[in-house]
Image: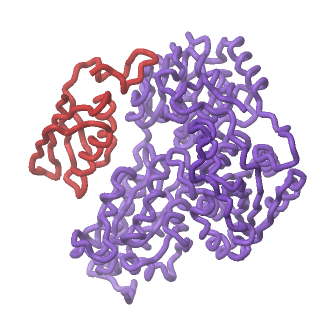
Amino acid sequence: MHNIRIQLAEREGALVRLLSNIERRGFIIESLHKTAAQNGVTDIAARITPRGERSLDVLTRQLSRLFDVMDVHTPMPAHMASHAMPPGEPSCRQPQ
Amino acid sequence: MTALPAAEIDAHSRPLMTGAQAVVRTLEDLGVRRIFGYPGGAIMPVYDALVGSKLEHILVRHEQAASFAADAQARLTGKAGVCLATSGPGATNLLTGIANAYMDSVPMVILTGQVPSTLMGTDAFQEVDVFGMSLPVVKHSMIVRHAEDIPATIREAFEIAEEGRPGPVLVDLPKDTLQASMAFETAMSAPTPAPSRASDDSIEEALSLLRAARRPVLYMGGGIALGHAVEAARDFMARTGIPTVATLKAIGCAHPDAQNYLGMLGMHGTRAANMAVQESDLLICCGARFDDRATGKPDQFAPHARIIHMDLDHAEIGKLRGVDAAIRGDLQDALARLDAGYLAIDSWRTLCRNRKQEFAFSYDAPGSGIYAPGLLKELSETAGDDFIAACDVGQHQMWVAQHCRFARPENHLTSAGLGAMGYGLPAGIGAALERPDSKVVTVTGDGSIMMNIQELATARRYGVPIRILLLDNASLGLVRQWQELFFDQNFSEIDLYDNPDFAEVARAFGVEAFTIHSRDEVPGAIQRLLNATGPILAHCLIDPRENVWPLVPPGKSNAEMMED
């Protein structure tokens, strides 16, 4: 289970685009909280679990590139945030 | 509807016009010359405004073809292609083409009509939620809610489609916004952000890996062409003398005669390319994404290699393979800075080159029937550097990738990520309209051409100089090949014995056509195709038993290539 916080521009479709991306990339949304928008920005906090063996680090970057997403924050151990993984080790098989 | 006279102005001297006129005016202001589309109820105000505009509208005969043709134009120009359709079925018919552009990172702007805002969400006639349906296959999408937002929304759609890693952007246009009157104001362009530049540390890290490597390989992907880094990649190859392989999308990035270029890797890659990757101790993945068709079984792909991954899109790094050095940023800049000099890897370089010679394709197939790989090789070499192929999907697509010579990556139009049958004919039309003086050839099969055969009418209407090479094996050849090899020859629904006479079909559309059966007819057919000035179809009957070799079986390592 991971905690993830996302700052999102409050635009039509932004929320559904974000949530569908989290699910499509292989994560289950266990719980979800959304604040009312302030100055056009809303905060999303979610607890998510990978459906298989998926990297949270990669998901974070996949969400970051969405046009409506302004910031993604995942409090996670530094070694998981790093790009350095053992040679030959597919990241999707990274131990949880 | 009746268009408002554009000469009317408001108190601030802004011209008054309809939302639909603003759509057309904005496209003109953005320098769009050609759009592909098909009219219908909700988009009719835009079609009304198109009359007398500077835009060239190409009327296709199925909306899917509009998206494929716009895709091909975008691949050739690097600028967003534009397609236009109505709501409901018009929009759903575009989806395959949108997905195709998304999978191959092609810049495209899709304009869809929508039922009036007040009816949205009521299951109105020809209403579908195309915004929702297209979410997983667009880079971004917007619904216009107010007519005055149209110029800025469309301008933003182009900016998003073309910046960074390109992709399709959909703009849904409810009919009431198209019909409303508005004061037109030219939307200002945001300054295009410069592509991010890789950090010095990451370049240094990569350089130290490169200097220490004894068996390095450059693995080129489609990002090189998208990032305008073809010359930089060729310079890097020449400077370092590094053995190089390419994905399907990167074919043409290396100069076709480059000594150290080993060809395509992966499922239908060359033995020299796959062996080099499998034995490498350092793999420089440049603008590629470790797609399963390139890697085979992922945990056995380049098992001894350390990985340098270069990509503009951070999200690709570490997605499927852990990396030892990540270069995140503009590829052209990064390749230029990766200055390791000529690598002292003589024995490795020689081994790779020798294998390239040893396992080179041979074209001395027995018999007198048409040998498709040989035909394609001869066709591309005869056409020269102006050769542009628009492929469909199947065996012929792989033969083009293996046997044709491409001077530039954008000259090889292929549905790589999506693998969408039906791409070839509309893509060829889009390409030939954009490059009428090039030798544009649609290479298709008897399965694929039937997916968009109605576009012969488009080719005929506009006199498009497209050459269609139809390789007819009276079957769905690639599926048949897999059933033969991996499903115990249990042939299921692949027999197209009752195909129509394709030459007759083409002639019925008013397209010149001829049929050939034997190898001695090939040189004449190539000349006839290349000398044509309008649409022409060569119907080539080939051996249905011919397979694509070599082949890495699904789920196997690239080291386990099957040969004929």
Chain B as rendered: colour:
purple
Please say which color scheme the image uses: by chain
Residue A33, by quadrant, is top left
Quarter of the image with the N terminus of chain B in it: bottom left
How many numbered circles are shown?
0
Q: Is residue B90 left or right of residue B248?
A: left
The reply to whether residue B56 is in sight is: no
Along the line of sight, which residue is nearer the eye, B463 or B557? B557
State the image coordinates of residue B465 (x, y, percent, origin top left): 71, 66
- Which quadrant, please, contains the C terminus of chain B? top right
Q: Nearer the viewer, residue B97 or B188?
A: B97
**Whole-percent x and y of residue B245?**
63, 29
Q: Residue at x 61, y 24 (%)?
A: B560
Query: Taking B126 as reference, is B374 left or right?
Result: right
Q: Write the residue at 30% across / 34% down.
A: A59
Chain in red (letter) = A
In the displayed structure, would residue B537 be above or below residue B254? Answer: below
Q: Position of residue B39 (x, y in %)?
A: 46, 77
Q: Residue at x 61, y 14 (%)?
A: B215
In the displayed structure image, the side of residue B271 where residue A58 appears, left or right: left
Q: Position of residue B443 (x, y in %)?
A: 68, 54
Tell which residue pokes out farthest to the bottom in this image. B2
**For the point 47% across and 78% down, which residue is it?**
B50
Seen as rendered, the residue at the extreme right is: B520
Say whether residue B138 is visible.
Answer: yes
Q: Is residue B524 above or below residue A68?
A: below
